[in-house]
Image (cartoon, grey):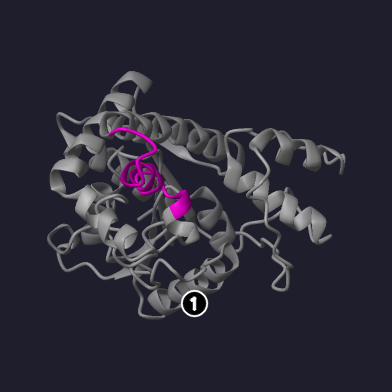
């Protein structure tokens, strides 16, 4: 059995993963593309040592922010960790909101390992989309999702594009658990989380990298990091920075829902924030019933 716990940012995935791991003899595999990196803690809402409650966690803090880590790398690493956990008769629990990481780990996704990299920094999102459209592929794109636009265009220009629409899951007994809540409450929680991050020291976390002159892909694209870089360089005010982080986090949550609903067979559970144990028990009953535990 493999369990996946996913959903939009700030919905409660970490807490759910710990409780399920304790009850189902599980060990946790990170499925968040930013939590791979060392030192990117507050801005990614990375699980703390106290929150782990001695539950083993994997694929956290495995790269420094200057290193490039691709979906292909994650696919290899995650599959090896899944194998190791299962060999010890434990339950792998993938936790995170990066849908492509989850699908790459569990489905027969194909990646090219020798792609030439192109510099698209001079192109805006519309120009990227216009160039993609010249290849006449039958797929819709969110013009706000720059990372995906660049990823697809890179593959098209390398002649390695494969949208993996017919990819099949590789493992038996995988349970895709999605946590959700109404949009208004979710957005409120996202805004609160951003405020809490600043209180917890997000500015100091990012300033350390800024002062070292580190301008890696992780720091230039990660929400909370790129906005503070603009603040430190004087491009925006602190209030504008905070509002941009909240706005982009909300938009990211919308994109996450789009991916999850179209790409993964998720069983959704509405989170009861007043009694989270009730949500935990609902998820457990679903897994037990489906798996005949």
Please give the name of the residue rendered at 26% of the width and 48% of the height, measured from the top-left corner.
Answer: 16
x then y, percent, for residue 201: 17, 50
Mark 1 surroundings: few (<14), some (14-19) or many (≥20) residues within 10 A = few
Q: Quadrant of residue 104?
A: bottom right
Front residue of 15/237: it is 237
x then y, percent, for residue 81: 43, 74
Q: Is residue 221 left or right of residue 95?
A: right
x then y, percent, for residue 37: 37, 65
Q: Is residue 190 visible?
A: yes
The quarter of the rendered structure image containing the C terminus is bottom left
Q: Which residue is mark 1?
A: 80
Q: Is residue 63 left or right of residue 106?
A: left
Q: Looking at this view, name the residue that lies furthest to the top.
A: 184
Q: Is residue 280 left or right of residue 100?
A: left
The quarter of the rendered structure image containing the N terminus is bottom left
Q: Is residue 87 above or below residue 72?
A: below
């Amino acid at each position: 059995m493999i369990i996946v716990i996913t959903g939009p940012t700030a919905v409660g995935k970490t807490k759910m993963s710990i409780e399920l791991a304790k009850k189902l003899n599980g060990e946790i595999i990170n499925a968040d593309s930013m939590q791979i990196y060392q030192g990117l803690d507050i801005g990614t809402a990375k699980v703390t040592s106290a929150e782990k409650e001695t539950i083993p966690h994997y694929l956290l803090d495995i790269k420094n922010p200057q290193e490039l880590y691709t979906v292909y790398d994650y696919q290899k690493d995650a599959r090896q960790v899944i194998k190791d956990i299962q060999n010890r008769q434990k339950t792998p629990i993938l936790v995170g909101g990066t849908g492509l990481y989850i699908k790459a780990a569990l489905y027969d996704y194909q990646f090219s390992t020798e792609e030439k990299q192109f510099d698209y920094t001079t192109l805006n999102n519309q120009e990227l989309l216009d160039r993609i459209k010249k290849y006449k592929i039958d797929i819709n794109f969110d013009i706000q999702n720059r990372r995906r636009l660049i990823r697809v265009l890179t593959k098209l220009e390398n002649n390695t594009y494969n949208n993996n629409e017919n990819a099949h899951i590789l493992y038996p007994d995988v349970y895709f658990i999605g946590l959700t809540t109404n949009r208004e409450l979710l957005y409120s929680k996202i805004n609160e989380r951003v405020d809490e991050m600043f209180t917890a020291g997000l500015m100091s976390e990012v300033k350390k990298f800024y002062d070292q002159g580190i301008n890696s892909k992780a720091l230039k694209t990660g929400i909370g990091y790129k906005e503070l870089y603009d603040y430190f360089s004087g491009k925006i005010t602190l209030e504008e920075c905070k509002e941009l982080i909240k706005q982009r986090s909300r938009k990211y949550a919308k994109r996450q829902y789009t991916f999850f609903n179209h790409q993964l067979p998720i069983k959704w559970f509405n989170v009861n924030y007043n009694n989270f144990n009730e949500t935990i028990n609902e998820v457990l009953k679903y897994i037990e019933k489906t798996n005949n535990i």
